[in-house]
Image: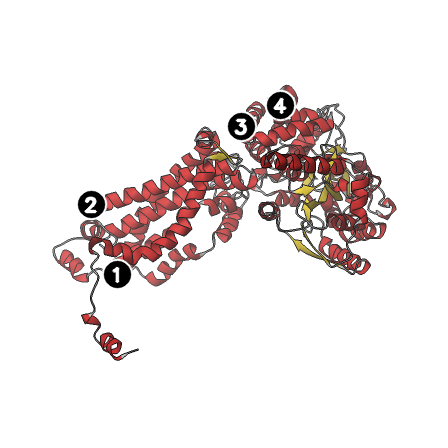
Amino acid sequence: MSRKRLAAALAVALACGAAALAGSGTGRGQAAARAAFPTGPVHLTMWWWGEQEAAGAKGWLADTVRLYEQKHPNVTIKTVLQTTDGLIPSFKAAAAAKKGPDLQYFWGGIWSVGDAWAGNTKPVSDYIPRSELRHYLNIREDTWNGKVWTAPWYVQPSFPVLYRKDVLAKAGIAPPRTWSQLLSACDKLNAKGIIPMAGGIKDGWFGGWLFSLIGAQNLRSLSDLLAAVSGEKKFTDPEFVAWWQRLHQMRDHKCWNNDINSLQLYQGQQKWAAGKAAMTITAGSDVKKFVGQVGVAKVGLMPMPKWANGPYAGKLGSTSQTVGITAWTKYPQVDADFIMFMHSPKRMKAWYKITGAFPADDRFDKSQITLPQQRLMFSLVTHGAPYLENFIPTELDSKANFGQSQLLLGGSANAEQAAATTERIAQRIRLTQRQTVANFKSWAASFH
Amino acid sequence: MNVSGAVAADRPHQRRRVRLGRLEPLVWIAPAACVVLFVFGYSMVELVRTALVYQGRWAGLANFRLTLSDSEFRTAVEHNARLLIAVPLLVASALVLAILLFEALRGWRFHRAAIFLPYVLPIPVIGVIFGQLLELNGLLNSALRSLGLGFLAVDWLGQPRWALWTMTGVIIWKELGFGVVLLLARLLSLPMETFEAARIDGARFFRLHRYVTVPQLGGVIAFYVVVEAITMVSWVFNYVYVMTNGQGGPGDATVVSELYIYQTAFQYQAPEVAASAAALLFGATLLLIILFFRVQRRTGVGIDD
């Protein structure tokens, strides 16, 4: 046997061994990983985000690290809060250098599995027992190839409609639960000089929200959407044009503030808080803040009014923000142990108390939730729908959902044009990001 | 040091000089050229190399073809080209203002500072201020409505048909100060006798500046044109990024080639396509610079003029 062949055979044998270990799931490989908790000094770094949407998270994380370090005196954990714009590029740079954090924050879905495809993370399901993981909310969106790649930390209910009971009552309108009720409410509110729904789309994000809230309602399964991304279906198919048509209807009925195109999302929401608008859409983590501003008795919460009969219609989208173990960390078992510590009952209780956001764990004692709007929201997210925006490539989201929503709501495009542009962008992504598209195909298999 | 060495040091003019002839300038600039070659040469080689591969495999010109076939890239380049319209406007406005200030307009020092101020303001500050000022229900439109000019109140940055022109206006406002100060500095260094002689010969304001001032400013104007042309082609990223929240919206109404490259490389994870777009943009900028030097050589107008 030549040297090359011998090396190749060795490599194959090693790969098979590694695959066998990885494939053993909760078996010996995982048990060995857990058993090998190091006793020497361990220094970990965690790059995270979340203070921006769950105020107080920084203090909670500092406390959690302190308590963990007390429990394991040989471990020190340094936490680095990232900016919204810096979170992804910093991690991409770290991944290119194979040097950086041991624990990294990821949004759910594509943000999580995308780095798994790139080989930047180790599956948490190799280090956290399935008996523990099954309690984490929304792990399905972070699952690919039979493994869970990042561990849910806290839930982002995505996204509830908040309505002002006082404003609607003044106009003599009941909260709209169906699409026709919504359009009729828009007409009536406009007639009384009240903005029906407040939002801002200048920064684009709102387009992704609207796609998820409206576009999920007629889908039969997530695999339909993933099939459209990979080219097995088209975004010009009627099922994908339908949501643009609903958005067009909203424009025709003047459901939004007239300056939606020149305001950022949070600027738009302030119109609702100021009592100028009857409804708005907000991040679940912001509900407590808005209810606090307006008053508990004046605020109602509901999912987006229903226009279709798909399995996700009438449900609140639910996604979890997650923590992953990087591919280059020396101590994955310690990383995993710290993640599990974050899910311990006392830490979950403290998390909710400090931030008002829900821990992504069905063991969380919901009796702690006192705000009625949050109680309702928690019950909605535990039986929620997948959050669609997390299942498409970023480029498609940004160029199609963000960009075309701006044009449609600004009156410069109609539903069919928006759908055609979406398909054109998708076609280009299929050309330029061939590997990503192939990964989407294999990801779709997880949802059949 | 020995004695003969000390003597030699005292008489440096007697040292034997190595004659390199035409190569001598090259020897003198060699160290700097090495640094420049390393800094820029390496990045250029790496840029072109990245543009010619796909996931580490040789792809030939495929990335360039992909870039050129992308309607959004073409739109971005078209927007850069449309921004070039701002260059003659900038030059004309800067010239008029510089001459007015040169003619010792009352309070010219204050006016000079006021005109130059936008140039020193950070672009993010400008972006935030104009972003709010130009909202549909912002200060500008409120003022227009209160003056009975509501028909002029449009969604300046929210409507695709207006967004790029609005952006152009903001860029002109910011960049104008640089041109005014540049031209004014040159004007103040010109010999006053020429102007006095022209005035004695009966030249009034327009003729004086048309036939005396402007020809003497040729070099500075050419420099300003090139700087601003390069700005419009490859230096407007900050304006677009800040004023449209990094989107180039509404839709793709304000996407420019730099934003396209940034988004493609860092947001959409397609570095090879971004590299090919960057190489094309570099080529366009290089073309502008070569054009400038050729015009300069042909007309004989230099920056020193």
Badge 2 amino acid: Thr
A253 in relation to B176, above or below: above
Name the image colouring: secondary structure
Q: Earlier in the sequence, mark 3 or mark 4?
A: 4
Foreground of the two, A137 or B135? A137
**Residue marked by disc 1:** B188
Q: Secondary structure at mark 1?
A: helix
Q: How far is disc 4 from disc 1 in space, using C-alphas?
A: 64 Å
Which mark, by number, is residue A431? 3
Which chain is indicated by disc 1? B
Q: For mark 1, does the 10 Å Cα neighbourhood hold few (<14), some (14 to 19), or many (20 or more) residues?
A: few
**Residue A330 location (% of width, % of height):** 69, 50
Of A109 and A314, nearer the camera is: A109
**Alpha-carbon neighbours of circle 4 within 10 Å: few (<14), some, or many (≥20)?**
many
Distance between the Cα atoms at labels 3 and 4? 22 Å
Indicate which label's residue lies in the foreground, 4 or 1: 4
Q: In the figure, is residue B275 to the left or right of A10?
A: left
Q: Residues within 10 Å of mark 3 (few under 14, many from 20)?
A: few
User: How far apart are the two marked residues, 2 and 4, measured between alpha carbons?
Assistant: 59 Å
Q: Chain of mark 4?
A: A
Measured in 3D between alpha carbons, the distance from the residue under mark 3 to the one under mark 1, in whole angstroms, is 58 Å
**Circles 3 and 4 in contact, beta carbons < 8 Å:** no
Q: Are marks 3 and 4 on the same chain?
A: yes
In the rendered image, which residue does mark 4 sit on?
A241
Q: Nearer the viewer, mark 3 or mark 1?
A: 3
- Mark toward the viewer: 2 or 3: 3
Secondary element at image label 3:
helix
Query: What residue is shown at x 43% (from left), y 31% (from top)?
Result: B61
- Look at label 4 and name its amino acid: Val
Residue B114 image offset from top left, x and y in percent: 40, 58
Q: Which one is nearer the viewer's eye here, B255 or A151?
A: A151
B66 sits to left or right of A226: left
